[in-house]
Amino acid sequence: MKKTPPAPSLLAVCPGDDLSRGPAGELAEELDLPLLPLSTDPRRCTSARAVLLVYVNGIALQLTGKQAPGPVSVDFGESTMRHRRGAGHNELLGRAVGIGKKDGLRVFDATAGLGRDSFVLADLGAQVTLCERHPVVAAMLRSGLQLAQSSTDPWLAGAAARMTLVASDAMELPAEQLQDFDVIYLDPMFRQRDQRAAVKKEMALFQFLLQEEPDSNEDLLHWALASPVARVVVKRPPRAASLADVKPSHSIKGKAVRYDVHVLSGLN
């Protein structure tokens, strides 16, 4: 009788180079995931549906299979992040959260994801706390932050020094932990029209990771509006309805994105 092959696990950890065997084993134990041998090729792997690759210079997540997109990692020093410094939507994001209205503005990014908007805000001078509930994404963020904070590039290390990571569900944090923040920033996942390969593979990654999790975006907004902050900012597609049908105080619109701003009190 022919044996049925075991079903692949959802996720596994794999060292990407010889020096990463130890850190890969530690991460696998931390996340309670299987550990694959060093030689595992994600495009030929049949024992897991996605592999968390651990390297000396960071970690990356890659879906498995011949047609799967390439790996995704958190690299705040990459060329696209440097390019964003002069991009027009940075100004829109800064205006939305209130950059310039208060010295030492403190922003709580409740849906950090890969942390790019948080890095932009930190680069603009804000003190940013990134909150990420998914343990794999949180591990990727932690790795990317550590690399950036230890960089010899003054710009990169300076912005990263204004960032702090909290690996938790934002709605489960005690209210007193939010009292020192001025702004809560929400970036609920939505499909973007941008068809660049990088955007598409990141969307595929998040759809894979969050496939079994309930949509809590509306609850998240109501939680944010009840929190002790001066404003809540929600990132939306340009023509999308307001999240949870709650009308914002005002919106700041760009060609590719819109920021809905809920003003609860003054920034002082």
Image (tube, helix red, strand yellow):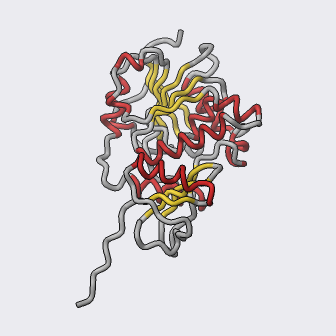
Task: Provide residue 40's location: percent of width, then percent of height.
Answer: 52, 69
Which x, y percent locates residue 66? 51, 75
* Placement of 15 over or under 139, stated as above or below: below
In-front residue for pair 174/92: 174
- 67 with respect to 90 (left or right): left
List x then y, in percent, for residue 93: 58, 32
Image quadrant where residue 264 sits? top left
Furthest residue in direction left, as rendered: 1
Numbered circles on residues, count: 0
Specify the quadrant that holds the N terminus: bottom left
State the residue at coordinates (55%, 27%).
128
Which one is in front, 260 or 267?
A: 267
Residue reaching furthest to the top: 268
Give the side of residue 109 with respect to residue 16, left or right.
left
Closer to the camera, 58 or 239? Answer: 58
Q: Residue, x 68% and y 35% (percent of image)?
A: 150
Q: Residue at x 47, y 49 (%)?
A: 27
- Res. 3 image quadrant: bottom left
Residue nearer the viewer, 219 or 202 = 202
Picture coordinates of residue 253 (x, y %)? 55, 36
Q: Residue furthest bottom?
A: 1
